[in-house]
Image (tube, rainbow, N blue to C red):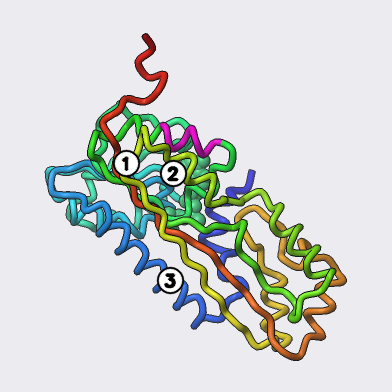
C-alpha cells in the first residue's frame, strides 16, 4: 500500500509551487517550529513528545533543548518517514536520546504522566473524528503542568485557488473541496481541549490571503497538485467546468488559508474514566 504521508512530504506537497514558493513555505514552517518550541520550553532533562514527527526536521532542536539527560519521543504512523527521520538525526551528538515510536496518535504507546511537553505541526488536523480521543490520550501522558503546542490548518475556513470573481460553479467546487476528508474546524479543537484537561488553553487564529497572477502555467501546476495527503489532484476535485474557468481567467485568483497555534497546559484533574470509582 502506498504511504500517503511519505508521498506527501517527499513528493507531492510542493508540486504546485515554484522553487521560491517552496523555499518560502519551508521558511514559514521553520518559524512555526520555533514558536512551538518557545511555547512549550522543554528544559534540560525533560521528556518531549513530537506527535507526527514526519521527516524529523524538528528533532535536532528538541534534542538540543532537553540535552543529554532528556528524552525526545518521536512518534509517527509512517514507518518510511520514521526511518528517514532516524537517518536525518544520526549525526546529532544526542541522537541516542530519541525514542522512536511507530504508532497511531490515537493509541499512544506511553505510560501515563511521563511526558513534560508535546509539540505537533500539522498533525492533529488528520485525526478527524478521533480528535477528542487523541487529545484525551495526550492529557493522559502529560504530567500536570505539562505543556502542549500545535500548529494546525483550519481547513473549514480555507479557500484554495478559485476563479475570481466567484461564481456558482466555483462555490460548488469550494464545497467539494471542503468535503475532503481532512478538515479541522476551530470548534472541534476548542471542544477537544476541554477545560477539565487543559487549562489555560489558547487558540490563536490566523488567516492569510494571497493573490496570485492567474498565469496559465501557475494555474496548470496548481490543478495538477494534490491539495492534501492522499487526495486526488485539485483539478479533479474542482471538475472540468471550474478548471476551464480558471484556465480562461485573465485577472487573478485568490487563496485564503486559515491556520492556528494552539497552546495548552495540562491541568491537575485526572482523565475522566481513567480512575473509575
Ligand atoms: C503534514 S505531515 C507533518 C510532519 C511534521 N510534523 C512536519 O512538521 O513536517 C503529517 C504527519 O503526521 C503523521 N500522521 C498522520 N496521521 C497520523 C496518526 N494517526 N498517528 C501518527 N502520526 C500521524 C504523518 O505520517 C506525517 O508525518
**How many discs mark residues in the rendered view?**
3
Q: Secondary structure at mark 2?
A: strand
- Distance in Å between CA atoms under marks 3 and 1: 31 Å
Q: Secondary structure at mark 3?
A: helix
- On the image, numbered disc 3 is attached to which residue? 26
Q: Determine whether label 3 and label 1 are within 8 Å by CB.
A: no
Residue 55 drawn above or below residue 165: above
Badge 2 crowding class, 10 Å Cα cut-off, few under 14, some 14 to 19, many 20 or more, is many
Q: Nearer the viewer, mark 1 or mark 2?
A: 1
The image quadrant where one finds the C terminus is top left
Q: Quadrant of residue 272?
A: top left
Q: Which residues are magenta?
A: 130-136
Nearer to me, 92 or 162:
162
x, y percent for residue 27: 39, 73
- Distance in Å between CA atoms under marks 3 and 2: 20 Å
Residue 84 visible in the current orientation: no
Q: Residue at (72%, 74%) from the top-left corner?
A: 162
The image quadrant where one finds the N terminus is top right
Numbered circle sitting on residue 181: none
Q: Main secondary structure of the magenta part?
A: helix
Residue 244 drawn above or below residue 231: below
Nearer to me, 237 or 76:
237
x, y percent for residue 265: 29, 43
Residue 10 drawn above or below residue 202: below
Q: Residue at (58%, 48%) from the top-left corner?
A: 3
- On the image, numbered disc 1 is attached to which residue? 199
Answer left or right for 66 relative to 156: left
Question: Any atom of ligand 1 within 8 Å of the CB at mark 1?
Answer: no
Q: Determine the residue located farthest toward the right in the rendered image.
A: 241
Label located before the other in sequence (3 or 2): 3
Amino acid at each position: 500500500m502506498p504511504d500517503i504521508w511519505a508521498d506527501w512530504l517527499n513528493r507531492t506537497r510542493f508540486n504546485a509551487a515554484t522553487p521560491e514558493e517552496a523555499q518560502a513555505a519551508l521558511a514559514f514552517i521553520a518559524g512555526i517550529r520555533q514558536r512551538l518550541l518557545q511555547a512549550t520550553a522543554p528544559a534540560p532533562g525533560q521528556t518531549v513528545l513530537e506527535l507526527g514527527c514526519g521527516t524529523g526536521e524538528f528533532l535536532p532542536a528538541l534534542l538540543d533543548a532537553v540535552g543529554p539527560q532528556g528524552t525526545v519521543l518521536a512518534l509517527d504512523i509512517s514507518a518510511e518517514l520514521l526511518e528517514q527521520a532516524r537517518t536525518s538525526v544520526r549525526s546529532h551528538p544526542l541522537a541516542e536520546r530519541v525514542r522512536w515510536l511507530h504508532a497511531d496518535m490515537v493509541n499512544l504507546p506511553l505510560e501515563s504522566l511521563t511526558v513534560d511537553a508535546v509539540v505537533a505541526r500539522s498533525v492533529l488536523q488528520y485525526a478527524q473524528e478521533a480528535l477528542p480521543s487523541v487529545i484525551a490520550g495526550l492529557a493522559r501522558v502529560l504530567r500536570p503542568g505539562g505543556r502542549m503546542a500545535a500548529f494546525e490548518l483550519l481547513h473549514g475556513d480555507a479557500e484554495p485557488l478559485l476563479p475570481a470573481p466567484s461564481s456558482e460553479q466555483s462555490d460548488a467546487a469550494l464545497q467539494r473541496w471542503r468535503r475532503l476528508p481532512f478538515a479541522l474546524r476551530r470548534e472541534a479543537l476548542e471542544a477537544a481541549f476541554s477545560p477539565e484537561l487543559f487549562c489555560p488553553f489558547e487558540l490563536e487564529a490566523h488567516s492569510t490571503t494571497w493573490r496570485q497572477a492567474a498565469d496559465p502555467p501557475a494555474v496548470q501546476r496548481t490543478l495538477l497538485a494534490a491539495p492534501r495527503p492522499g487526495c486526488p489532484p485539485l483539478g479533479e476535485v474542482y471538475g472540468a467546468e471550474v478548471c476551464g474557468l480558471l484556465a480562461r481567467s485573465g485577472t487573478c485568483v485568490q487563496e485564503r488559508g486559515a491556520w492556528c497555534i494552539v497552546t495548552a497546559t495540562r491541568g491537575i484533574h485526572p482523565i475522566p474514566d481513567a480512575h473509575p470509582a
